[in-house]
Structure formats: structure tokens, C-alpha cells
Image (tube, rainbow, N blue to C red):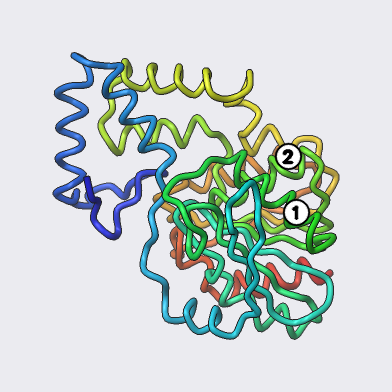
Amino acid sequence: MALHKKEQLHGGRAHGKPLSPSLRVMRLLFSTFGPLFPQLMGGWAYSLWFRTRRFPESAAGRRIASTAQRDTLMVDGIPVAVYSWGTGPIVLFIHGWSGRGSQVAAFTEPLLAAGFRVMAIDAPGHGATPGDRTNILECAAVLQAFNHHYGSVYGAITHSFGGMVLAYAMNNGLTVARVVVISAPAHVEYLLQAFAQTLGIPESVTADMRRRMDARFPDGYWEKISTVVNVRTLDVPALIIHDENDRSVPWEQGRIIASAWPGARFLKTSGLGHGRILRNQAVVDAAVDFINT
């Protein structure tokens, strides 16, 4: 079933925002058939959880992507799209769920002026990298492969789910000197609850979905991939930025991450939401200054 081009299943929804026709149908199906056929509907929910979507690329994104040096990094048989600008120590941008590497656009020129090489990837199922689904372990493997192929990463800027991916990768061996985490979820439990709320999924269906994940992934998967768990032992300077008007991932999630990350700084913005925050000049300046300190 096709979703409206602006519909997003991961994360919360703004109060009062009208539902698209496709989402209304999905909610009706889950509420009607979920209690009757929890395993059948659990399988559907499980599939939807991993599905990615490609939203239209912004004009700024298209422009910056057209100036990049393009490369392809093979990771477990997946040709991952890699973008690069300039020379110097690497600052890697890691996009969020259903995002793309060209969302680094606003950061590129300031980072180049500061003497960095700016790089970005399209995760599996995102942007120019093929596929229509992925998971945090697959995305973290891409970061490990990137590090092995291109060398050490000095700084990283992440958005949303990208922060969760980076935290997991760093807690499993990836070394980064300075990190800026923007609009990231602290707990995978929050994402699951928001996902279930968005689709109107009954608890019996959510339970079946969890059972499927427990069978597929290692023991303790839910805890191991949560950002707040992975940052507790990181001895790396970090700047956590979150907007108080973020309706996809509430700003309190960012505060939780900053409190758990030893020595991290927290910057709360206002009026930028979940996406515009990547284009705000004050946010860009704060991120570049932090990495360049």
C-alpha cells in the first residue's frame, strides 16, 4: 500500500495533523484485524518497521550533490553511495531514517572553509543506494566499512536515526574524535511506541512484532541499539542539539542523551522542528565551531 509522499511512520506526529487516506486505511486495518489475527498483522507491522522511503530531494540537496566527488562502497553486497567534498580531516554526515546524504548541504561550505573534508553516505534503502528496507545493524556495518576504506573519521554530524546508528557503531569500535548529534531518539522503545501509535497498532500485534525481532536479532537487541545505552561509556566530546518544537522526536529525547553522555553539551533550539534544524544557520555555526574546536 502506497503512502502519501510526506508520510513518515517512524517518530511521532504533530497533534491535529490530518491523516493521509493511505494511513487512515492502514489504521483501520490494524484496529479491525489486529485483535483477530495478531500474528498475521504482526508480520505486516514487522515488515513496515524496516521499510524505508525516499522523500523528494531538496533543491539545495540536488545542488550540493551535483558538486560532490561520487564513489561507491560495497558493503555486504550493497553498493553504498558515497559523497565527498574537499580535502583534510574527514567530517562524516549520517542522515536519518528516509533521509539522504545531501542533507549535509548547509554544513558543507562552512566545514570546507574550516579545512575539513566533508563526506556523506546514503544508507541502504536511502537516496542513491538501492533497496527499500534496512536496520541499525546494517547501517552501523556501513560506518565500519567506511572507516576501514577511507580512514579515520575526525568528526561526525548526525540527524535523527543517524545518531542512534553512530552511537551503536562507536560503542562497537568505531573511533570519532568529535560528534554533533541532532534530533536523535534516545530509546528504541520510544520509536516503537510512536510507530504503533501512528498506525494504531494493538498491543497484541506489537507483541508479535517484538517476538519476530527477538527471534531475528541477538539477545538484548532492544537495549543494545538504544542511543542512551551506547553513549554511557563514550569518552568523546559531543554536542547534542534538539528543537523544542520537534514533533517527530521530542526534545526530551535529546536531553536524555546529553545527560547519559559523559561531558556532553546540550543545545535546545526553538521553532525549527525536526527537519528545518539542518538548514538553520545558528545550528550550522554551532556544529562547525564545535567540531573545529
Residue named by callout 2: 231
Q: Percent x, y for residue 139?
A: 61, 47
- Mark nearer the N terminus (2 vs 1): 2
Assess disc 2: are there few (<14), some (14-19) or many (≥20) residues with their C-alpha within 10 Å of its C-alpha: many
Q: Percent x, y for residue 260?
A: 71, 37
Pointers 2 and 1 in contact (C-beta within 8 Å): yes
CA distance for labels 2 and 1: 10 Å
The image's mark for residue 187 is none
**Secondary element type, mark 1:** strand
The quadrant in which the N terminus is found is top left
Residue named by callout 1: 238
Identify the image quadrant of residue 39: top left
Amino acid tagged 2: Val
Residue at the (31%, 50%) spot, across then down? 14
Assess disc 1: are there few (<14), some (14-19) or many (≥20) residues with their C-alpha within 10 Å of its C-alpha: many
Q: Please, is residue 72 above or below residue 241 in the view?
A: below
200 or 39: nearer the viewer: 39
Q: Percent x, y for residue 154?
A: 82, 63
Amino acid tagged 1: Ala
101 or 81: nearer the viewer: 81
Q: Percent x, y for residue 179?
A: 74, 57
- Regarding residue 268, the answer to whether it shows in the image is no
Name of the residue lying farthest toward the front? 77
Residue at the (69%, 79%) spot, across then down? 85
Q: Please, is residue 158 above or below residue 103 in the view?
A: above
**Secondary element type, mark 2:** loop
- In the rendered structure, the answer to whether residue 61 lies left or right of residue 35 reads right
- In the rendered structure, the answer to whether residue 2 lies left or right of residue 194 reads left
Residue at the (34%, 25%) spot, across then down? 43
Identify the image quadrant of residue 217: top right
Identify the image quadrant of residue 123: bottom right
Residue at the (53%, 68%) spot, across then down? 278
